[in-house]
Image: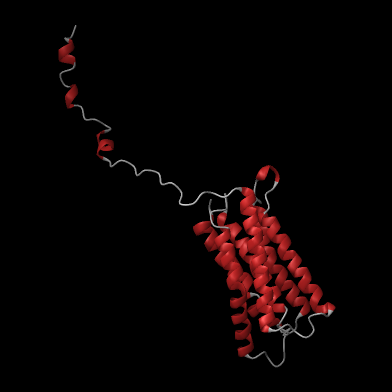
Amino acid sequence: MANERDLLSGIEDIPDPAAHLVARPPPAPAAVPAEPSLTRPARERRALIASMVGLAWILIFSWIEGFRDDLGSPGVAVPLAVGAALSGLGLLLALRPRARGLPAGVRALQTLVAAVPVGFLAAALATSRVADPPVPLELHLRCIASAVGTGLVPFALAALVLRRSFLSAPAWRGAAIGALCGLAVVIGLGTHCELDDLIHVALAHGLPIAAGALLGAAAGALRGRA
């Protein structure tokens, strides 16, 4: 029988397979969040306040620009009211929890992101015409500048209030909310811009929807995940 000392004589020459783990620096301690997470009622209350402030800003900016003379006519007021209602319902769909507290599914968000611009373009095709002569470039630029001024506050509020709010698909949720905020801006533009040229409506008025979806997707991907 082999001597036990002879069997163990070379054990110290065997390399330690975990030696490289000892050389690693210790992991950094977990950082405590700088701000506590909001409860669901507090988050919903903050989102409601932000929505009301954004709506008030759109109305104030439209008032500063000057309401159109035919704003009270059914042909103008009804489409604007329908668009405003759809924008609000879309925000409820995107933000309101479903059964068991789960958020809206990715399919519903993707449908919203597609439906808002498609619905807007369909409405533009149905109610607008190609102007002859074409609308001057200055009027296009004026509406684009108005769209930027109108959308600045709602977009900033949405990015601030919904930071660290999305448990899943933050880019899609941000895109849906951004597109719906853009639709609200389009409603504001419609209260003071009387041009019904198809090119003007599709490009100058449609810009907030496209920009809102892209900015919302970026903000959601970067800062939206809870």
Residue placed most toward the observer, 113 or 51: 51
Q: Say how the picture is coloured.
A: secondary structure
- Name the spot of residue 84 as percent of width and height, x first: 74, 68
The answer to which of 59 and 148 lies nearer the viewer is 59
Quadrant where the N terminus is found in the figure? top left
Which residue is located at x 46 percent, y 49 percent?
A: 33
In this rendering, the answer to whether 7 lies above or below 138 is: above
Image mark count? 0
Q: In which quadrant of the rendered view does residue 15 lie?
A: top left
Residue 64 spot, x, y in % from top left: 66, 82
**Residue located farthest toward the bottom when viewing the structure as drawn:** 133
Q: Residue at x 16, y 21 (%)?
A: 10
Which of 223 and 64 lies nearest the eye of the viewer?
64
Image location of residue 144, percent across then percent down: 61, 81
Lateral position of residue 101 relative to residue 156, left or right: right
- Tell me which residue sits at (62%, 80%) in the image: 146
- Horizontal arrangement in the rendering, residue 199 relative to residue 9 (left or right): right
Q: Where is residue 148 in the image (x, y as percent from the top left)?
A: 59, 77
Eyeballing the image, is 163 above or below 64? above
Residue farthest along the right direction in this orientation: 74
Instruction: Write the residue at 64% across / 68% down.
Output: 54
